[in-house]
Amino acid sequence: MKKLVVLALLSLLATTAFAGLDPDPDMLGLYFDTAGETVCTTAAFISHVNMYVLLTNPTIPSVRGFECSLDKPAGTNSAFTVTFPVANINVGVAPSIIVGFSVPVPTSPATVMATVDVFVLDGALDIFLNPASPESPPLNGLPKVVREDFTIMSVGTSTNGGVAAQINAPACMVVDNEDASFGAVKALFR
């Protein structure tokens, strides 16, 4: 009976682990929709797909910029072209984005920080969201946003360096990084 309960719980967690907008405050993520619900999609070879860098559930009323890195595995050919919601200065060198906005961008539960045109030149593509290089202080291995008063605030990512978005993956492997491990959940039923 315990095994049945564990299996039911795991199947529920597997289907809902990343089914919608990240509930944690001040998170940066990659999505294929502006609502922050789609992290995996399909696309034909030599086509274009829009991907969005979203600041989800911000605790600040506006942002003046951000920094992160959009990484893909070595040997992949797909290309990224990044545009921003307002006039800006981007001093990052690809794959890093280090951008300052000309005016504050008001935040919402899913704030579009950038639109990324992905030119699909691979069968399957894993995309990672990491800190920019070079990283602004504090040097903590996290992406950053710039507050309205020009101070820098670290923000988290749902996947902590894991795959943040996928195109043409056989199975969507993007999962929210949870504090509880499988072993910890399993121990509840001993």
Image (cartoon, helix red, strand yellow):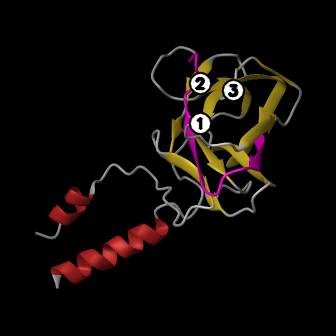
The crowd level at tag 1 (other Cα within 10 Å; few <14, some 14-19, many 20+) is: some
Q: Earlier in the sequence, mark 3 or mark 1?
A: 1
Residue 149 magenta-drawn? Answer: no
From the viewer's side, name the closer residue of 74 and 172: 74
Q: Position of residue 124 (x, y in %)?
A: 60, 56
Q: Amino acid at mark 2?
A: Ala
Q: Measure how far apart labels 1 and 2 are at the Cα level.
A: 10 Å
Q: Residue at x 26, y 59 (%)?
A: 182
Residue to which mark 1 is pinned: 71
Q: Residue at x 51, y 60 (%)?
A: 18
Instruction: Point out the image quarter for the N terminus.
Output: bottom left
Q: Nearer the viewer, residue 40 or 159?
A: 40
Quadrant in the picture for the C terminus:
bottom left
Q: Which residues are magenta?
A: 114-135
Which residue type does callout 3 highlight? Answer: Ala
**Residue for badge 3:** 94
Residue drawn at 17 percent across, 79 percent down: 2
Q: In this view of the protein, can residue 163 be seen by the observer?
A: yes
- Seen in the picture, residue 190 relative to 29 is either above or below; the reply is below
Quarter location, residue 19: bottom right
Residue 113 appearing in the image: no
User: Which numbered disc flags the more N-terminal residue, 2 or 3?
Assistant: 3
Disc 2 versus disc 3: distance between alpha carbons?
9 Å
- Specify which label sits upstream in the sequence, 1 or 2: 1
Q: Nearer the viewer, mark 1 or mark 2?
A: 1
Q: Gap in Å between the C-alphas at discs 3 and 1?
A: 9 Å
Residue under label 2, please give it.
Answer: 132
Type of amino acid at the residue the image marks with label 1: Asp
Quadrant in the picture for residue 94: top right
**Residue 128 belongs to the span the image colors magenta:** yes
